[in-house]
Amino acid sequence: MLLTVTGCGESGPTAAQAGETLKAHITELMRQRHALDVQITDPGGRDIRCGEGRAKRTFAAVGRDPAPETGGDSLNDLLLGALSRVAPYRITEDRGDAPIWLANDEYKTTIILESPGNGRYRVRGETACLSIS
């Protein structure tokens, strides 16, 4: 299991700290799945304002499964299994044949598994609206 120390105070992580954790979780998730040709489609690293003195961060990546015929739901299921080796996320939405939304309350992060199929993984995420400093 990958644990990222955020050095947070009593009020939890800042947007930047949670953003780095999100990046680490998604990157490690792709590594755990042995995804090929991983590309970062949203490098994050910038504040998206969402209130006075608050912001959220994003991060996204795509990769390829060695089996190009694997469908989207199967790829998402594989990612879901691998995510349990990265960090404890809980499913917040899974309607079948649609993206799977997962949240981690400790790190204030959300990960969305939205693989389109044809052996292509797609994962994106965002942090909660958190303090900038």
Image: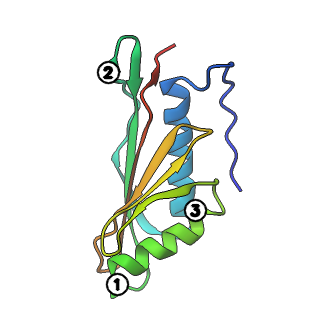
Q: Is residue 63 left or right of residue 98?
A: right
Q: Is residue 65 visible?
A: no
- Point out residue 42 in the picture as x, y percentages from the top left corner: 33, 44
Q: How is the image coloured?
A: rainbow
**Which amino acid lies under the numbered mark 2 shown in the image of this protein?**
Arg
Q: Are marks 3 and 1 in contact (CB under 8 Å)?
A: no
Q: Is residue 32 left or right of residue 78?
A: right
Label 2 sits on residue = 49
> Which is more foreground, mark 2 or mark 1?
2
Report which quarter residue 34 is drawn in: bottom right
Tell me what residue is drawn at x 30 percent, y 77 percent.
Answer: 117
Q: Is residue 76 visible?
A: yes
In terms of sequence position, does the residue under pointer 2 or pointer 1 come before the other? 2
Q: Secondary structure at mark 2?
A: strand
Label 1 sits on residue = 68
Mark 2 is surrounded, within 10 Å at the Cα level, by few (under 14), some (14 to 19) or many (20 or more) other residues, namely some
> Which of the labelled discs sits on residue 19, or is there none?
none
Tell me what residue is drawn at x 68 percent, y 51 percent.
Answer: 2
Label 3 sits on residue = 83
